[in-house]
Every structure is written in C-alpha cells, then in structure tokens.
Amino acid sequence: MNLLTLVRSRFVGPLSALVTDIAPLLDMIRPAQDAKFGDFQANFAMSLSKQLGKPPREIAEAVKSQLQIDDLCELPEVAGPGFINLRLKDTFLAEQVAKIAGDDRLGVQPAKTPRHVIVDFSSPNVAKPMHVGHLRSTVIGDAISHTLKFAGHKVTSDNHIGDWGTQFGMIIYGYRHFRNQAAFETEAVSELARLYKLVNQLSDYQATVSKLPATEQAVDDARNLLAQQEKAAATDDKLKKQLNGLKKQITAAEEAFKSAKETVSSVQQNPSLLAMSNAHPEIARKAREETAKLHAGDPENNALWNQFLPACLEALNRIYVRLGIEFDLTLGESYYNPMLAGVVQSLKEKQLARLSEGATCVFVEGNAAPFIVQKSDGAFTYATTDLATIQYRRETLHANELLYVVDKRQSEHFQQLFATTRLWGISDLKLLHVSFGTVMGKDGKPYKTRSGDTVGLESLLDEAITRARRIVDENDEKRREGAILSGEERAQVAEIVGLGGIKYADLHHNRESDYVFDWDKMLATTGDTAAYMQYAYARICGIFRKLNLDRNTVATSGAAVLLTCPEERRLVMQLLMFGNAVDNMLSEYRPHLLTTWLYETADSFSKFYDRCSVQDAESEELRTSRLVLCDLMARAIRTGLSMLGIQVAEVM
Ligand code: ARG
C-alpha cells in the first residue's frame, strides 16, 4: 500500500479528461508541506492553466468536481491560486492502519514487475590501503541491495575488487627487493601494504625530486606576475578583479611546492630510504614492467599474485564479516582478463576504437579526454575491464540494471563508460553511477584512519564498539530498577550500537555531500542517529515486557485502532507513508530518504507517547489500540533499520 499512489490514482480520470500527458501532473500531487493544508496537496492547476488557457482556480474547481475520493478524503478544498488540499478521513486511516497491524512490511507489497539489478559496491583495491571511501561504498551499496530486495527485485551484489591493477607491479617489485620475510610470514597483508607504500613513496620521490626546481620556479613566476598586475591594476578596475584569480594561483603553486618538498625530504632525511632510492632508480617504470609481465601471463609473477591474493581477500573478509555484509559474487577485475582482448577487438571492428599516440582509444563526444582501452605498451585498463564486465553482466547474468556505488571523483570514468557502452550497441541495460562524496575529518581534510589500510579500518570499527560500550554501560547503570544486562549482553549491544552508528551516520547524509566524521554525533542517543532508533525500539519492547504482554498476540488480535488526538493521527499517517519512503529511496537510490522517514516517524512516535498515555489509557480498547501502534512502530524501526544493514536489540 502506498497512500500517495492511491490518492494520485483518483486523479487519473479527471485529469485524462483534460489533457493526454498526465504523468507530470500526477507528480505534482505531493504530501502537504504544512499540516494546516491537510495531508496532500495538488498544485497542477497552475501548470494546466498555461496549457488550457483558463484561470487555475477554475481548473482546480473543475477537477475537484470530477474527483471520486470521498471514501478516502474529507471534502477537498481549493485554496490560494488553485491548490487542491486533501485531508484523509480518520476512519480511512484507522481502517488502513488496523490492516497492517503486526505486519513487518507495514503493508508494502513486492513489485509486480521485478527487475534484476546488479549492485557493484565496496570494490576495494586489494593489497592497497583500503580507505573510508570504500566503507562508504560498502554501507551505501548494502543498504540499496537490501531495499531493492525488500521491494521484490532480484538483486545480485557484486564486489568488483581491484585485484589486477598496477599496484601489483609495485608489490611484486617490493616483494622481490625489500620484503621482511618474518613480517610477511606473520602478517602478510600488513607487509604487502608496507611494500606498496614504500615503492609508491620511492616512485613519488623520484618523480618529484627532478621537478622540484620547476615547482619552485612556478611559485616565483606566479608572484612576479601578481606584482606586475598589481601595478597595472592601480589604474585599471578590470584588472583589479583578476588579481584574486592570481592570488589563488599563487596559493595553489605554494601548496604544490610545499607538498613536493615534503615528498622529497621524507626520503632525503631518511638515509635508508635514500639509499634504497639510489639503488633502485626508475622504480616506477620497473614496477610497471612487473604489472605488464603479470598481465602477459609471466609464470613467476602469476605465482606471486596467486600467493598474495588469498591473504588479501581474507583481510577484506574479516571486515565484511564484522559489518555483517555478504556478497552474492566477488568477481574481481582479474576474472575478466581473458575477455579483454575480445572487447578491444570488437570495439575496433565496430570502428569505435582507434589508435591515438600508440594507445587504442574510444572518443566520446563531449569529452576532451579519450577513453583508453589499451595502452601503448599493450596493457588493458580499468575501462576495458569495466566494458567486459558490462557485457558479462548482461549476457551471462541477464541483468536489467547495473548500479555502481563509487566515489563521485570517478564520474568522468562512468560517463565515458556508459557512453561507450551505448555506442557499442548495448541499449537495453539501465546504467547508473550511484556516486557519493568524501568523508571529511574535523580538520576539513579527507578523513584518514590511523594507518590508512584495512587494519586501520578494523581499528575504526573497534573504536566505534568501545565508545558504544561506554554508552551502553552508562545507560544500563542509570536504570531506575538497577542494571539488567550481563557483560556479554552489553558487549552484544555495544556491537550493534557501534556498527549501527557508523553505518547510519553515513547513510543519513545525502550521499553526494561530503560529511564530517564525528564520533559524538554518530553515537548520540538523541537526534537522527541509529542509537536513537535502537533505544526507541528497545523501549517499546520494554513497555510490553512490563505489562507482561506478547507483542504478536496484541498486534494480531484484530483490535480496532482509535484516533483520539492529533499526535496519534500524525503517527498513523507516518506509518502508512512507509511504502512511499521506500519508493522515494529507490527512485534515486538515496538512503537518506529512508532515514528521514525513520527519523520523522520516530519523532512522531515520541510526541504520541508523550501526549497519549498507553498504560493508563481511558479505556481498555484505547489501551489496546495504542499498544498496536507501539508494536507497529517497533516493526517500522526494525524493518527500516534492517534495510540499512543495521540491527536492533530487544533489551539495551
Ligand atoms: N576498485 C575501484 C576503486 O577502488 C572501484 C571499482 C568500482 N567498480 C567498477 N566496476 N568500476 O577505485
């Protein structure tokens, strides 16, 4: 049941009598912004007025007179320039909510035409530091997968791990020349991450040191230019405006120089690093050669790859297990290696790809940069793999829709990928980049876990749980009746609250925005947080325990729901809008539309609970009715949170 869809359906007849294209008009029937206008408001009359050349109020009155809606709504009102205000009847609401009593799905039916959606998410690069951005992808992708499944679609979650990229060349080179065998034997993944960072640092150093004088010169040049312009600007207003741009250029050049100096001194001030760099000139090129050999099937490099991979996957798996996240498929980039030559061949045959400066490229209109599918040294790219993956997902997995939950800094890649796919002749597949912003630290810079690798991510989860534990302890100890949780129970609850906090903090922001990672906000028990919802859930379970009543029995007793005060009505309205929230979330794949609904519903519950006494309700009937609503609220929280990959506990 979706209230909004139901209300809109009643306008189909009256609107069709006026115009043919009614879809955009139906879209203009929305939940009212302000309760004083009722529950829903239709504001299509203004737009129809232009089409029909009649005053909007007249149109609104005409539509209203044709409307058959008195089983759902009070008499509609035409207000202002031509809004139609609709208020659902209390009897209708009471009836509807009674129908969904005890239903974990809150009356939401599975889709009539299910789609097969592949959700590509998490997808970290193995053996390379995994960062909080991958955690974002993991949490958002998981929420989208759960919600799609809830809505009745077939979902395949696919962890498209980067297990074939250039980082392997660096690791192989590092392993051959710099490995600490003992460390590798005890903690392979940390040692590989160290080797990756080391080779990366040395290549950065070598690339930077030779350019350092030029980088410094750029600062001087920018300063000189500014000095000249300043003189000229004294007599010219137009030039004055350009000064700011120049000042920004100076800052950028200074920053570039500063970071270059840091890169250089980090090696030069460390004699052993400097000795390594001197003994391994052109390290970047040599590492690239190792990657090329790996891709060309060199047995030694492939043996090393086979040796490294299981440990890397295991380290990732530890994180997924802790987060309670499962994938239907984990087909890394390496899986597609045998298909890459065929992709390039096919693009060439269709005359989409051509040679440019030695590389095979597709040129997509509107994009200055070419989409490179094979480099001049013969290596295939991230792009080639993604094209092969699309073909596989369409032809072998028979998907209808592919979602890529990936950092927005990769937008250009996906834009070119999708455009190339269309040119390639694939038109029956929906492709969407579900992009997201950056997690920021309080210092305004991208948030980094302490060691910046999977280990860092694990300690992040540990910290969440430790902090949550303090809250759980405190709440348990300050109970009026005294503490009730055992140590083990507290640990379980802390896990649920800590992980829920991290996930929810991410999901309740519009995914495209950057957000600041803030422990205190994330674990607060009031406000828009997982802990707030989880405590509300446990409180409701507590009400039933105290009354010694079984929630299921009350919920399925067939009792009538009575609407006696505005807070009660508001809560019922919210509960009945769940289907709408799910549709909204899925129409743009924005989890925050679901958290917003959860928060608003929990908020109306807390107002209801403050205002309407449950235990001491005026009558037995009213008490049962309110208990049914309490139970339904608990189900709303449990279902809503579970769609976000977050758990609840009956006692906390
Ligand atoms: N491994 C990539 C990265 O860490 C993300 C991959 C996303 N999925 C894809 N099919 N391109 O940046």
Image (cartoon, rainbow, N blue to C red):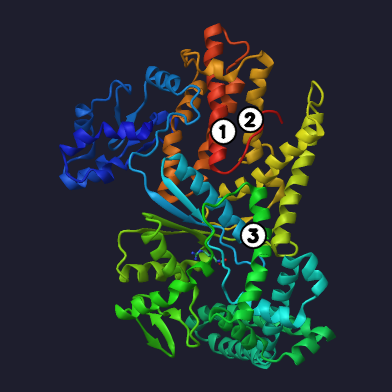
What label sits on residue 637 in the rendered view?
1
Q: Which residue is drawn at 59% across and 49% down?
A: 325
Q: Please report whichever mark, 3 or 2, sits nearer to the chain's N-terminal start.
A: 3
Q: Where is residue 595 in the image (x, y as percent from the top left)?
A: 54, 41
The numbered mark at residue 148 is: none
Between circles 2 and 1, the one closer to the viewer is 1
Q: How many labels does the image show?
A: 3
Residue at image point 79% right, 84% down: 273
115 versus 514 height, above or below: above
Q: Tell me, yes or no, whether the two marked residues, 3 and 2, touch with CB atoms within 8 Å.
A: no
Which residue occupies the foreground of this view, 214 or 550? Answer: 550
Q: Mark 2 points at which residue?
A: 536
Q: In this view, does 198 lie above or below 77?
A: below
Q: Is mark 3 on a helix, strand or loop?
A: helix
- Residue 118, picture quadrant: bottom left
Percent from the top left, x then y, of residue 150? Answer: 46, 39
Reply above or below: 115 against 340: above
Helix, strand or loop for disc 1: helix
Q: Do the residues labelled 2 and 1 touch (CB within 8 Å)?
A: yes
Q: Give the alpha-carbon distance from disc 2 to disc 1, as whole Å.
A: 8 Å
Q: In which quarter of the image is the C terminus?
A: top right
In whole angstroms, how far apart are the C-alphas of marks 1 and 3?
Answer: 27 Å
Residue at mark 3: 132
Say which amino acid is labelled 2. Answer: Ala
Tell me the crowding category of disc 3: few under 14, some 14 to 19, or many 20 or more residues within 10 angstroms, Cα based.
many
